[in-house]
Image (cartoon, grey):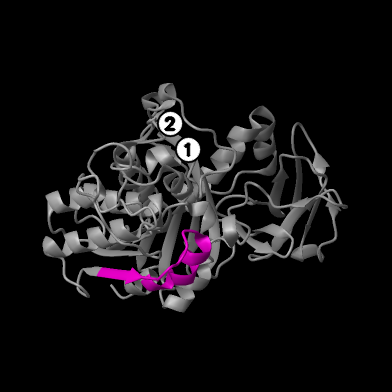
Amino acid sequence: MRLISLALVVLALGAAPGCTAKTPADRAPDSADSDADADTDSDTDSDAEPPGLDAILAELRSDRDGTLQAYSEGAFRTGATGGGWPVQVTGGWLFVDPASTGNLAGTFNDWTPEPMTADDGFSYLVHSADRGDGYKFTDGFDDWHADEWARALTWDENGEMSVLHPEGAHLEHLFAVAGQGLVARDIHVWVPAGTPDRVLYAEDGQNLFDPNAIWGGWHLDDALAEAGADSTLVVGIFNTCDRMEEYTHVEDTLDGDLYGGWGDAYADFIEDDVRPLTAETYFPETGEPSVTGLLGSSLGGLISFHVADRYPGEFTFAASMSGTMGWGSIELHNDTMIERYAAHGHQDTVLYLDSGGSGDCVDSDGDGIMDDDLEADDNYCENIQLRDTLVSVGYQYEVDLYHWWEPDATHDEVAWAARVALPLQLFGSL
C-alpha cells in the first residue's frame, strides 16, 4: 500500500486536459460504441480519379464535419494520392478551414495571407503548393493557427504548423480512432524517411512529439535518431479522460474512490483496432513488420506490460519507464503486474523496465508487494521487485530482460525524455 498523495501525483501525469474524475456510474466502457468506427472504411479505389472540387464542396455543405472526417479516413485507408487534407483537386490543393478564419498563408506564398472563399460553415481556397510546404490559417493579424484536419504537422517558433504531405521523415495525424467501446482518440504517427522495418506502439501519444506538451514532452523524434532507431514507425496513441481506467488491468482505490480495470478492453483496442489500422495504412502490401514493440511511462508503462502479457508472443518488445507496477495493491488487494508475471511465467517478449527514485523496499502490510517505504519514489521498489520476479521465472539479463535505474530521477516527461533513447536503442537492435 502506497502513500495516497504520491499515488495521485503519479497517476495524474499525462492525462488529457479538461478531464474530470469518473463517477461509479461512468466506470464502464460503452459497448454500444464498440464498433463505432466499423463503417468508416472506404471502398474507394486508390487508382480512381480524385473527386472534383464541386463535389467536395457539396459534401461539405451537406455535412461539414462528417466530410472532413471521411476524406481524412478515406485517404489514409486507401492510400490515395494526397493522403488526407489538403485534398488534391484539379488546379492545385483544396484547403478547407472550418473556423472560417479568413486567409491562407504558407511557404508557397511567402507567408502572405491570401483571402479564402467563405461558404456555408467553412472557407476554402484552391492553391498550388509543393509537398513539404508549411501553412497556417490566419485572420491576417493575431490569429495564426494550424489546420486542425491536416494529415501532417510540425512545430515552429509560434506553435503547431501544418505540412502539405511531406515525403521525408515526418509526423502524421490520424483522427478519432475508436474501438472496443472506448472513447475515440487521435493518434500521432512518426513516419521515418525510409521504409519502416519495425513498429513501436507508444502510450500518451500527445506527449511524445509536441514540444509544447507537459514539461516539454519527450522529443521522441530526436531520441529515435540518437538511438539509431530511425527506421522505426512510431504509433503514438493519445490518452483520454479515461486514462486511469484504460491504463490499468484491475481496479484499485485512491482515498476510497474506485478506479481502473479497463486494461483488457484497451489491450484489445491496440491488438484488434490500432494494429490492423496501422498495417492497412502504412503497410498495405507487406503487412506489419515482424518486429513490433510497446512503450509507455507511469501508467503507460503498466499498460504496455499488460498488453504484452495479454497477448503473449504477439509483440517483440515491451518497455516500461517508471511503470506503476504496484497498481492493484495501493488500497485493495487485486493482482499487481508483479503477480501476473510471476503466475504466467517466462514468455517470448523482450522486456525493458526502469525507474528513477530510490528507497528501502519493504512490505510492512504483508500483502506481498514491496511498496511500503513512504520515502521511496518513482515506483522504484515495485520495479525492483518486478525485475527480480522476472529473473525468478526464467528471464535472463541482457538476453530478454533489461533493467535500468537512474538514481533519484523524477517522475515526469523531463526524466523520461532524458533516458528514452535507452529502450529505443534496444528496440532498434532487435
Few, some or many C-alpha atoms within 10 Å of disc 2 (few <14, some 14-19, many ≥20)? some
| Left or right, 315 with reference to 85 | left
Identify the residue shown where x is 19% and y is 73%.
399
Q: Quadrant of residue 362?
A: bottom left
Identify the residue shown where x is 66% and y is 28%.
62
- 181 up-or-down from 399: above or below: above
Which SS class for mark 1? strand
Identify the residue shown where x is 61% and y is 58%.
153
Q: Is residue 316 visible?
A: no
**Mark 1 or mark 2: whose residue is earlier in sequence:** 2
Q: Could you tell me the amino acid type at mark 1?
A: Ala
Q: Could you tell me the amino acid type at mark 2?
A: Ala
Name the residue tied to disc 1.
Answer: 184
Measured in 3D between alpha carbons, the distance from the residue under mark 1 to the one under mark 2, in whole angstroms, is 9 Å
Q: Are marks 1 and 2 in contact (CB under 8 Å)?
A: yes
Instruction: Pick the quarter of the image with the C terminus.
Output: bottom left
- Looking at the rendered image, the disc whose residue lies closer to the viewer, 1 or 2, is 1
- Give the residue furthest to the front: 364
Q: Determine which of the numbered discs, if any, sits on residue 36 in the image.
A: 2
- The reply to whether the magenta stretch includes residue 409 is yes
Residue bounds of the magenta highlight: 402-422
